[in-house]
Amino acid sequence: MKVLVTGHQGYLGTVMVPVLQAAGHDVTGLDSGLFEQCVLGPAPLDPPGIEQDLRDVSVTQLAGFDAVVHLAALSNDPLGALAPEITYAINHRGSVRLARLAKEAGVRRFLYASTCSVYGAADDGLVNEDTALRPLTPYAESKVRVEDDVAAIADDWFSPVFLRNATAFGFSPRLRADIVVNNLVAHAVLTGVVRVLSDGTPWRPLVHAQDIAVAFLTALEAPIHKIHCAAFNVGTETNNLTVAEIAEAVVGAVPSSHLLITGETGPDPRSYRVDFSRFRDTLGYEATWSVADGATQLYRAYLAYGLNQHDFAHKFTRLPHLDALRSAGLLDESMRWIRTAA
């Protein structure tokens, strides 16, 4: 298939594109380049790409594709809280506009990267795709709105599918250090301490970036009647862990590190465990990476590629990176690049 991947220069896109290409698909990227330079280790080999802000995509740019894999978003809860209107403009309105234009252009398949954080909080048991959604952040709320609005334009020709990823972890050449496993491993490598600011009790569902890539490939190649306008949780029940258990896995992966649970921020209201059986039963998908194996992968990559404190705190953490671009006069208040005559 001829596939357009939005956000191909992001954390997940950089891992996903080679997986799609290895399966024989003709991949083109679309990205504004906000995180193009956030590379740890050898620079990745990007596919042919369209440099374009998601909000400014035209129907002609989408013509000729069999599928759109839509990853591009402002993916950070602190950023969403700081600038909720921009989060909604990009993540919600930009995504729905993209889907409408893809339909107009004759694109058949639309794979949307949603999130398990749409469930928000659950008191007991496992949440599944039929559980009431209770998003707690602008980021999660934007994902719920996109699912609703894109489902409303589905028809016999235009077939969306909503892949609700668990919290991602694992190494990507375009690293994110502001997600829980990646962050804790970085702290352990740089300071010797795995520091947990909450009380460690909240539950988190986790999934490796490589497993997310395989999930999207699985959905891309699935018979349309099995996935049409459906939501699927992406992950594995064995990676439903408390924050304290995640931290313990990191201590086990990073030699000479130790765990410190401060509890200074109190309990986190975002706590939920997820049932991933629908995707497994429908398409035979299995996530294979454990948190322990992912933590070991990250530890080895951080050492091999020389992760340092400055890059950890600024280059690979979304909010400081975007703040630096704005402070340098490169981004405007809407997170668009400022183009000069020169």
Image (cartoon, helix red, strand yellow):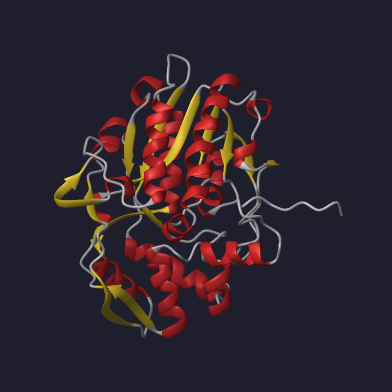
- Camera-nearest residue between 8 and 252: 8
Residue located at (59% from left, 65% from top) = 323
**Location of residue 51 in the rendering, given as x and y in whole percent from the top left corner:** 69, 44
**Location of residue 106 in the rendering, given as x and y in whole percent from the top left corner:** 57, 19
Residue located at (45% from left, 65% from top) = 178
Q: Is residue 52 above or below residue 103?
A: below
Is residue 52 at all visible to an observer of this figure?
yes
Q: Is residue 192 above or below residue 167?
A: below
Is residue 71 at all visible to an observer of this figure?
no
Locate the C terminus and report the quarter of the image it occupies.
bottom right
Locate the N terminus and report the quarter of the image it occupies.
top right
Q: Name the residue at the top extreme.
A: 156
Q: Name the residue at the left extreme.
A: 124
Taking 70 as reference, is 164 left or right? left
**Location of residue 152 in the rendering, given as x and y in whole percent from the top left corner:** 40, 23
The quarter holding residue 221 reads top left
